[in-house]
Amino acid sequence: MSLPRNLQEVVEWRGIKDLVAAEVLYDDAEHGYVTGNVFSIAGVANLEKSVDSSDDAHYYDNQPMVVISSTSADTVTIDVSAIPFDVLAAITGQFYDETTGAMIEGERNPSYFAIGYNTQNTAGESVYVWRYKGKFNIPNSSHATMQNDTTANGQQIVYTGITTTTKFNSVTDKMGNPIGAKALNINASKTSADVTEFFDTVTTPDDLSGAVTKYEVSYSLGGAASSNKAAAVASGDAYETTITAPAGKTLGTVYVYMGGVDVSSTAVTGGAVSIASVTGDVAIIASIS
């Protein structure tokens, strides 16, 4: 008797850190898959993903002829430290007053978010994960009187993940047609891909394969607002935004740098920024008075 082929080292999952999120700004045929800036949610203690799948046989001529498979949405349950009010309001679609630092609970309008995290196994290997599209529930919170012990409470939040509408060229079905994706998992010790900037922006399958080069977009607006909050733009794509001052304030001169070069003279008209083809990292700088 021969030994099983591809005998693997036995490992278990042990450890999780760096829980981050980014708002999904677009996920459609016109814009593709576009996300905002990546931000930290809270300290993470535990994460559990569950998904219901089924395989049902369909009968013809009195016998099973076809097996139909289906997969539901992912349910990701995450135990975290107390989530800051501004982050909690953002991910659950509630109102946060930046002036007073108050979160107002009430009717909500939640957006879709991508979430990322880094988990490890007992072999010391890091696995990087991005889950591409889902919504957060409003977590429960528990508060109790302080006692002469170490009792304290975090929170548990549930993320329901679905498949992107955007189809990625590097992910295909059996016929070779691009399809959407729920998540990307990559073992950093067993890949030739560069993962040094994996969590700087949301890394898609096309980014990882090198099919698309993306350039970072940074904003230093001094209190002004940008109508486009995309954190990255694909090479060669156009980028447009409008910079506006808050009520009662005046917008100063807007500067745009691309690849470290000042392109303001051709890219800026008043508060409107328009770049026909992005060829480097973009930095937008503005001030108000």
Image (cartoon, rainbow, N blue to C red):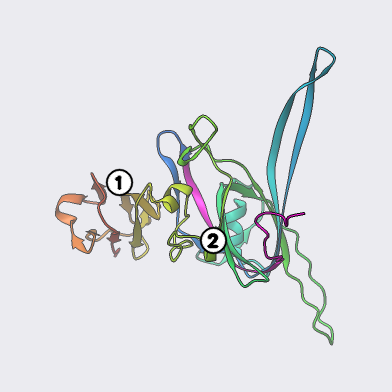
Q: Is residue 111 above or below residue 21?
A: above
- In the shown orientation, is residue 95 left or right of residue 252? right
Residue 247 is situated, as x and y percent measured from the top left of the image, at: 37, 55
> Magenta includes 253?
no
Q: Is residue 242 above or below residue 56?
A: below
Q: Residue at x 33, y 62 (%)?
A: 221
Q: Residue at x 44, y 33 (%)?
A: 29
Label for residue 45?
A: none
- In the shown orientation, is residue 193 left or right of residue 140? left
Q: Nearer the viewer, residue 45 or 86?
A: 45
Q: Residue at x 26, y 56 (%)?
A: 280
Residue 276 is situated, as x and y percent measured from the top left of the image, at: 23, 44
Q: In the figure, residue 31 lies in which quadrant?
A: top left
Q: In the rendered view of the protein, which quadrant contains the C terminus?
A: bottom left
Q: Is residue 32 visible?
A: yes
Q: In the rendered view of the protein, which quadrant contains the N terminus?
A: bottom right
The magenta stretch is: 1-26
Real-space Cα separation, disc 1 to disc 2, in angstroms? 28 Å
Label for residue 97?
A: 2
- Sequence order check: which comes first, mark 1 or mark 2? 2
In the image, which is nearer the foreground, mark 1 or mark 2?
1
The type of residue carrying mark 2 is Asp
At label 1, counting other C-alpha atoms closer than 10 Å, the crowd grade (few under 14, some 14-19, many 20 or more) is: some
Q: Nearer the viewer, residue 268 or 53?
A: 53
Q: Residue furthest front?
A: 1
Secondary structure beneath label 1: strand
Label for residue 240?
A: 1
- In the shown orientation, is residue 147 left or right of residue 45? right
